[in-house]
Image (spheres, rainbow, N blue to C red):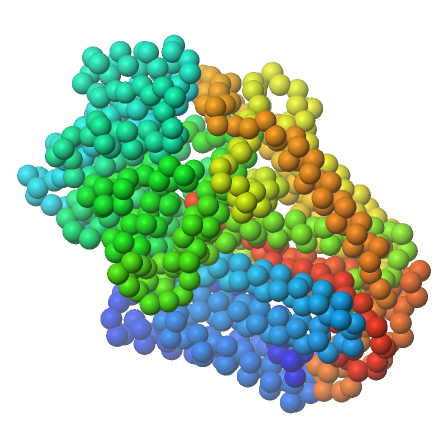
């Protein structure tokens, strides 16, 4: 019966996901009793239709009446138990969530049963159980991504969303005094002055502007800015050998330069062009005395001319168009730094900015919420900055974000665990989940690399004629693997397109931009567990005249792993006449393309057309982070590549031969057919078996951070069988969790 429910979930999850992205007519009324009744009725009707579709597929596959009823009943039960939780969602979002979670739960139950009922030796059982724990972690990551998808696309009644039509106004005489702080470090003076000019044109009666130059080591960069500030009444300070990096500079401005009457502190990065209505729109939100911070979206300029920058723009926009509104609905929005306002009394109560964390903005918002303050995200963008103009700068940024996210998890992880609210921790369950899932999702890239190791080892085993490495899969599970892989990929790209307005081509390109940074993020997620301070990646100097091999050199670790991946694909295809060969090649294709995209994106960024001012910024971008970067990049990349190769070889020479049952038998209500053990020199002697690991990426970007990640959410098992048996439970199987 369990196999029948698993098969039903494999049918229901793709149907539910497809329904979520179909265009529908928007309802004018989303609140009130009638709207709630309508959503409930549509959810019930959709559940019935989905159950009928599942029953029809099971009937076509020849399932028994008992298993047909079990599969359809499983879909109905999963839908009904989630109705109270998803009552504000559309029926389509509800069905997508319920059917996908059903697939996760049933698969994990199925995998655990096979692990402990396979007559394995103690070591193999322990190994299989540890691998199952990895799959559980992958399933939790997938659920976090999926919740965000369904919440963003399916919520009909937004209780806290601040759209351009939402009234936010107070009498002109009551607006708070705002102190805008602009930190700068090794920035081109013309760009900084343009930012200050825009700030002086704000349509707001009470504000001041403070420029803090943070340890710029070239006097020719900060002296012109100092002179301009002196002529235009802008407070200026140049800090020499000042500790704390950006946080230290902001604390200096807060404690030594800010007007005593200032009630609100704003942060604006030195590359942002602010529209005049920024403060007039956002500052009135502080009329609510418990609003601790307000965050407006970060937007960018200079991205329309080149394909690479267009795709990078959409990858950034995902966080503010999809993630932040969903988090804001549960009062779990992140303060993202620039384009944000903070209540000064709240900032003072918490002791200012914490200088130990390199993502000081997100860390501050968590402390504010924990202290009982509330945050707001507004949908409308009011400022336009500059994205990283080289791919290497993007990698450095992603490294910082991931390292800072894990720093927050290390220090505040206990307060994010489920528990009661108290005087020292006012976080609600929704706020805890928003910040915990956002931090943990950084490990999706590390998880993807672990599965990449299994895939490489499986490919090497297959190419050399081995048959003893990984559990084999029947036709039933072989069919499930590509379904889960494609489901995660299509769902992620479709959400990116729907949330940002990108074309399908640009959405796919944006998705692979984040995939191409997976190695550096995986490294940061490990280093941050042990290091107290970040060792950033060095951004090499670049220009339009750079050679193509310099892009390979700057991303040599990703390029090397991509070559291993292509070699694995070629090795798997040597067994093209077996199910195992094409399946393993297909599973390797996605992570390999993601790694190969790193030098491609690097070359595209270096050659992309930019206006004159941004070309100069791109040529000197490496200087901005030179002070904070460490020189151990080559060593870190070498260790990552060497570790992956060694792990793959270790897996290759530690496997054992396995048996494979025919799982279609139990699904049809009949005993499983017994299959003989496959000789070690032939990885697949029956058409229903394959000796490959399974890896299924489930994608959703984010910015955890403050940006959409994709996390692979499947794995492969390699535990041996020690005692043959004719029972289906004698053979463990591996299949991905989306």
Q: Residue at x 82, y 61 (%)?
A: 655
Observer-nearest of 630 and 713: 630
Q: Residue at x 93, y 66 (%)?
A: 679
Examine the rendering and report whether any part of residue 28 can be seen: no
Q: Residue furthest bottom?
A: 66
Q: Position of residue 488 (x, y in %)?
A: 58, 57
Observer-nearest of 227 and 121: 121
* Left/right of residue 250 with respect to residue 657 in the rendered view: left
Q: Position of residue 120 (x, y in %)?
A: 78, 73
Please tell me whether residue 287 is drawn above or below residue 16 in the rendered image.
above
The N terminus sits in image quarter = bottom right
Q: Position of residue 722 (x, y in %)?
A: 84, 73
Q: Residue at x 62, y 64 (%)?
A: 133
Q: Position of residue 559 (x, y in %)?
A: 70, 35
* Left/right of residue 724 with respect to residue 518 in the rendered view: right
* Left/right of residue 289 with respect to residue 368 in the rendered view: left
Q: Residue furthest left?
A: 173
Examine the rendering and report whether any part of residue 50 can be seen: yes
Please tell me whether residue 563 is drawn above or below residue 724 in the rendered image.
above
Q: Hey, which quadrant is residue 179 in on the image?
A: top left
Q: Residue at x 76, y 67 (%)?
A: 124
């Amino acid at each position: 019966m369990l196999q029948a429910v698993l098969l039903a979930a494999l049918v229901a999850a793709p149907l539910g996901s497809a329904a979520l992205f179909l265009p529908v007519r928007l309802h004018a009324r989303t609140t009130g009793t009638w709207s709630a009744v309508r959503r409930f009725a549509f959810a019930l009707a959709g559940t019935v239709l989905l159950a009928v579709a599942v029953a029809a597929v099971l009937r076509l596959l020849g399932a028994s009446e008992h298993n047909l009823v079990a599969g359809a009943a499983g879909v109905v039960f999963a839908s009904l138990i989630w109705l109270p939780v998803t009552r504000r969602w559309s029926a389509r979002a509800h069905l997508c969530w319920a059917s996908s979670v059903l697939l996760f739960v049933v698969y994990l139950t199925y995998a655990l049963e096979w692990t402990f009922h396979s007559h394995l030796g103690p070591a193999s059982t322990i190994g299989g159980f540890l691998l199952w724990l990895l799959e559980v972690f992958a399933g939790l990551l997938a659920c976090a991504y999926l919740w965000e998808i369904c919440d963003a696309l399916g919520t009909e009644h937004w209780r806290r969303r601040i759209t351009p039509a939402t009234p936010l106004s107070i009498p002109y005489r009551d607006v708070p005094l705002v102190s805008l702080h602009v930190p700068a470090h090794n920035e081109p003076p013309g760009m900084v002055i343009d930012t200050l000019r825009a700030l002086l044109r704000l349509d707001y009666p009470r504000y001041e502007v403070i420029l803090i130059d943070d340890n710029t080591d070239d006097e020719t960069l900060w002296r012109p800015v100092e002179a301009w500030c002196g002529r235009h009444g802008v407070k200026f300070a140049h800090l020499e050998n000042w500790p704390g990096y950006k946080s230290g500079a902001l604390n200096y401005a807060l404690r030594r330069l800010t007007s005593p009457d200032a009630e609100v502190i704003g942060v604006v990065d030195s590359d942002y062009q602010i529209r005049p209505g920024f403060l007039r729109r956002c500052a009135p939100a502080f009329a609510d005395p418990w609003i601790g911070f307000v965050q407006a979206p970060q937007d960018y300029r200079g991205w329309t001319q080149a394909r690479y920058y267009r795709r990078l723009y959409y990858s950034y926009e995902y966080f503010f168009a999809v993630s932040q509104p969903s988090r804001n609905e549960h009062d779990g929005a992140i303060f993202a730094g620039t384009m944000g306002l903070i209540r000064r009394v709240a900032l003072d109560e918490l002791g200012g900015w914490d200088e130990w964390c390199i993502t000081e903005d997100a860390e501050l918002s968590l402390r504010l919420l924990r202290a009982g303050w509330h945050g707001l995200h507004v949908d409308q963008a009011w400022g336009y900055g500059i994205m990283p103009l080289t791919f290497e700068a993007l990698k450095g940024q992603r490294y910082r974000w991931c390292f800072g996210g894990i720093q927050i998890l290390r220090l505040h992880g206990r307060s994010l665990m489920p528990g009661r609210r108290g005087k020292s921790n006012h976080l609600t369950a929704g706020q805890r989940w928003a910040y915990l899932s956002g931090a943990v999702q950084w490990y999706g890239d590390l998880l993807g690399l672990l599965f990449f190791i299994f895939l490489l080892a499986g490919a090497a085993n297959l190419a050399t004629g081995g048959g003893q490495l990984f559990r084999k899969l029947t036709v039933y599970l072989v069919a499930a693997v590509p379904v889960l892989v494609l489901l995660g990929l299509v769902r992620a790209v479709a959400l990116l397109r729907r949330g940002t307005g990108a074309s399908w081509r640009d959405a796919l390109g944006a998705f692979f931009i984040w995939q191409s940074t997976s190695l550096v993020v995986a490294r940061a997620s490990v280093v941050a567990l042990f290091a107290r301070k970040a060792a950033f990646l060095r951004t090499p100097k670049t220009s339009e005249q750079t050679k193509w091999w310099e892009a390979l050199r700057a991303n040599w670790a990703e390029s090397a792993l991509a070559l291993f991946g292509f070699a694995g694909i070629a090795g798997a295809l040597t067994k093209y006449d077996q199910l195992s060969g094409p399946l393993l090649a297909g599973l390797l294709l996605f992570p390999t393309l993601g790694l190969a995209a790193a030098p491609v994106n690097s070359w595209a960024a270096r050659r992309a057309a930019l206006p004159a001012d941004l070309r100069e910024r791109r040529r000197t971008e490496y200087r901005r982070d030179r002070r904070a970067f460490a020189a151990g990049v080559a060593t870190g990349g070498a260790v990552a590549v060497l570790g992956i190769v060694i792990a793959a070889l270790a897996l290759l020479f530690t496997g054992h031969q396995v048996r494979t049952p025919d799982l279609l038998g139990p699904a049809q209500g009949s005993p499983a057919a017994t299959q003989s053990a496959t000789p070690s020199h032939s990885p697949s002697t029956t058409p229903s078996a394959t000796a490959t690991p399974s890896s299924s990426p489930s994608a959703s970007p984010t910015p955890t951070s403050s940006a959409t990640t994709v996390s692979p959410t499947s794995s492969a098992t390699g535990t041996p069988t020690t005692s043959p048996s004719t029972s289906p439970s004698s053979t463990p199987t591996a299949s991905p969790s989306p």
